[in-house]
Amino acid sequence: MSRRIVVTGLGTLNACGNDVESSWTAVLAGRSGVGRITRFDAAGMGMPCLIAAELKDFEPTRWIEPRELKKLDRMTMYGIAATEMAWDDAGLPRGADGGLDRERAGVILGTGIGGLDTIEDTHTTIMEKGPQRVSAFFVPKMMANAVAGNVSIRLGLQGPNFITSSACASSNHAMACALRSIREGECDLVVSGGAEATITSMGMAGFNSMRAMSRRNDDPAAASRPFDRGRDGFVMGEGAGILIFEELEHARRRGARIYCEVLGAGMTADAHHITAPAPGGSGPARAMALALKDARLDPDQVDYINAHGTSTELNDIAETHAIKTVFGDHARRLAISSSKSMVGHLLGGSGGVEGVFTALSVFGDVVHPTINQDEADPECDLDYVPNAAREMKVRHALSNSLGFGGHNVTLCFGKV
């Protein structure tokens, strides 16, 4: 019999809150975390997009020793903080004598870019002061895998330890790998999800040049509007979302609280274009179909989809078409919502935060809204849970992540 995988711990920090409770309360209330950029002077640089979904009042010393901060990129700090929350939420032991077989506990996390803040600051140092002034911590700070390595070291986890990097699909790829690692008997427990910190002048400049981001600077809270006719691009977010994946009997033996079961995953590629989705959403459709097959579910057994929902013209149409392809008539009975309407687009960290929210929807039978749903787009004509949360039975839910490069990953969660 195949080993079953459940979620026993959750941790997140994002623009709507620095922990699970506050961020979940905020998104259920439909509160936007988007505001004017404070991290740097975007207006002084002449950037057309002056808004982002920044973390508020982030205090890394709540989780990390002050002397360690100079060794860590902001992205890694986010990942560590969210992991500490999830680890404690799962009731897992600290120290080598806690009864956990740490050789069978892994860390598989996603990030799309890695230590961009460190890379950008170090380039400035080279240009202004010369290469001899580059910090000895530069390489271990900027490495994309630094987040997984540091989490492993802090918790003493000696199982599989790596990151996946597939743009906006990174976290979902990580969780798909975590699912399979436990299912195949390699691990009993995996820390998974992802983190990202790209609200920097370099990160924003790049996406500005692509004309990918919203320019609704005069009304930041209304800027991220997935599936709405008035959408004009995504809003950059930051933070982390971490889930503890655990083998069911392992969790039961230690009396763990179980949020939901991780039933399946599907992964595909568009093989079409490096940034644009394939017309008709054929890649996401196959990912959702494969996730359902892996979970041994029929389409009409799904109640909710946490959509990729970026608030860009092409993505929202392609994802809508994909859902119709997979679900047929049942597509109009699905509740679909986009977390990005409130927390922004965390790139490689998006799937982790959205995985946390999807697990909470299954656990609590409630789904958060897609805010800023003011005018229907004729090509996006499904039920996107407009502007108000909905209490409903959530037996099974999908979480979609679609990334530049044509990467598509769908995870399936369900009640135990």
Image (tube, rainbow, N blue to C red):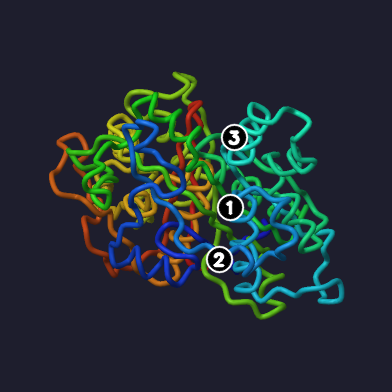
When asked about the image quadrant of residue 204, the answer is: top left
Q: Residue at x 57, y 49 (%)?
A: 195
SS label for mark 3: helix
**Residues at marks 2 and 3, CA–CA distance in whole angstroms:** 31 Å
Tell me, for residue 120, which label it has, or none: 3
Q: Are marks 2 and 1 in contact (CB under 8 Å)?
A: no
Q: Tag 3 or tag 1, which sits nearer the N-term?
A: 3
Residue occupying image coordinates x 29% and y 67%: 29
Question: Residue 309, position in %: x, y?
Answer: 34, 43
Q: Which residue is mark 1?
A: 193
Whichever of callouts 2 and 3 sits on the residue coming sooner in the sequence is 2
Residue 281, percent from left and from top: 36, 30
In the rendered structure, the answer to whether residue 210 lies left or right of residue 331 reads: right
Q: Secondary structure at mark 1?
A: strand
Q: Is residue 293 among what the camera can see?
A: yes
Q: For mark 1, does the 10 Å Cα neighbourhood hold few (<14), some (14 to 19), or many (20 or more) residues? A: many
- Disc 2 from disc 1: Cα separation: 10 Å
Name the residue that disc number 2 marks.
Answer: 10
Of 104 and 310, nearer the camera is: 310
Quarter placement of the N terminus: bottom right
Q: Is residue 369 above or below residue 291?
A: below
| On screen, residue 395 above or below 173 | below
Hey, which residue is sitting farthest bottom in the picture? 255
Question: Does the rendering let one see residue 325?
Answer: no
Kindly identify the amino acid type of the residue bearing the numbered disc 3: Glu
Residue displayed at 31% across by 32% down: 48
Comparing labels 1 and 3, the label whose residue is closer to the camera: 3
Q: Residue furthest front?
A: 129
SS at circle 2? strand
